[in-house]
Amino acid sequence: MKGKRDNPMSKHNANVRLPRAKGIDMATVYTPKECAVKVKHFLLPERNHNIVAEFLAILGMREVFEEHGVPIPNKVVMYGPPGTGKTLTAFYMAKMLDLPLILVRLDAIIHSHLGETGSNIRKIFDYARSYPCVLFLDEFDALARTRESNDEVKEMARAVNTLLQCLDDFGDKSIFMAATNLEKELDRAIWRRFDTKMTYELPDDQSRQLYMERLIGPFAREEGILADACEQLAGCSFADIEQIMLKAKRKAIIEHKPLHKKHVSASYQEYQPAVM
Ligand SMILES: Nc1ncnc2c1ncn2[C@@H]1O[C@H](COP(=O)(O)OP(=O)(O)O)[C@@H](O)[C@H]1O
Ligand SMILES: [Mg+2]
């Protein structure tokens, strides 16, 4: 592998300023190092892991693909329930590619004035095109809803058209990633623009167990707690599991006791996850 210091892509873009709207930056920029910190406990289920691995392998062979005249993929859409690792995947991708992650702030982009939202979308895409990076749009459905099914029909139709144009003009230096919980409501034309699609699901028994094991780590525990907790937290997202296990650890710490299944069940009761 190429040394990180040699990678011209890792250079931060000092020449172009982040566009602003409503008095704030339209995005938050994370360095690859900051991204690496975020994905410390990341657990990517096998199917998505394979998709990501292939994606990274292709990007590592850019020249070969150019020789063959085969376009490289660079538009990823991720969908599935909240708290299953979509956002983390964007951080992971940026870390693996050693590129900065540009996390778009929807609150800055979406504007009540007609045309303003579209113009903001264009600005942030132009910015992301100006140097290699991962541009990430979370809660993508807020911008890319079907043109018919929207209340603010005109404004959104215009924004969706702008988005389509921006996706077509994006080039292949940067990566575009989008996440949504509402894939059925995405505009079909937008949907077709993505070359890579990943579904996210709530953790199954095996991933739940693995994740809990990681979260407990070297913390002292009663025997058999993992099996019990695993059963109790069935149907929880990774994000729920994390919150519940943290709560349980806090309870154990203030009692000066090893982690016990009653800590987990009390935390579960208090946290009340929206189990699906
Ligand atoms: N697959 C996963 N592996 C490890 N932790 C996860 C995973 N999915 C979610 N989490 C935890 O939940 C939090 C929210 O996850 P996030 O990636 O934002 O979910 P989503 O974008 O799917 O709603 C993360 O910061 C992490 O603590
Ligand atoms: Mg998210």
Image (spheres, rainbow, N blue to C red):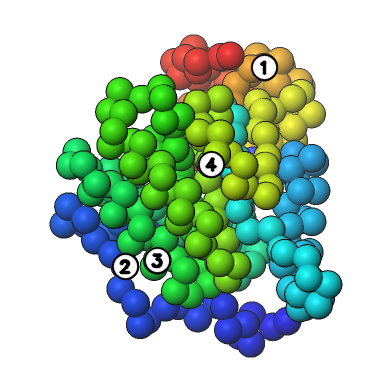
Q: Measure the C-alpha gap from mark 2 to mark 1.
A: 42 Å
Residue placed most toward the observer, 168 or 85: 168
Residue 20 located left or right of residue 180: left
Residue matched to label 3: 126
* Mark earlier in primary sequence (2, 3): 2
Could you give the CA–CA distance between mark 1 and mark 3, rounded to whole angstroms?
Answer: 44 Å
Instruction: Count neighbours of disc 3 (C-alpha within 10 A) and say few if under 14, some if 14 to 19, many if 20 or more.
Output: some
Query: Circle 2 — which element?
Result: loop
Which mark is on residue 234?
A: 1
- The residue mark sitting in front, 2 or 3, is 3
The residue at 30%/23% (across/down) is 151
Q: Where ligand 1 lies, by quadrant?
A: top right
The amino acid marked with disc number 4 is Ile
Camera-nearest label, 1 or 3: 3
Q: Secondary structure at mark 3?
A: helix
Image mark for residue 18: 2
Whether label 3 lies within 8 Å of ligand 2 gets the answer: no
Q: Earlier in the sequence, mark 1 or mark 3?
A: 3
Tell me the crowding category of disc 2: few under 14, some 14 to 19, or many 20 or more residues within 10 angstroms, Cα based. Answer: some
- The residue at 51%/62% (across/down) is 170
Q: Which residue is mark 4?
A: 190
Alpha-carbon distance for marks 3 and 4?
18 Å
Residue type at mark 2: give it: Leu
- Of marks 1 and 4, the one in the foreground: 4
Of the two numbered discs 1 and 4 on the same chain, state the one appearing first in sequence.
4
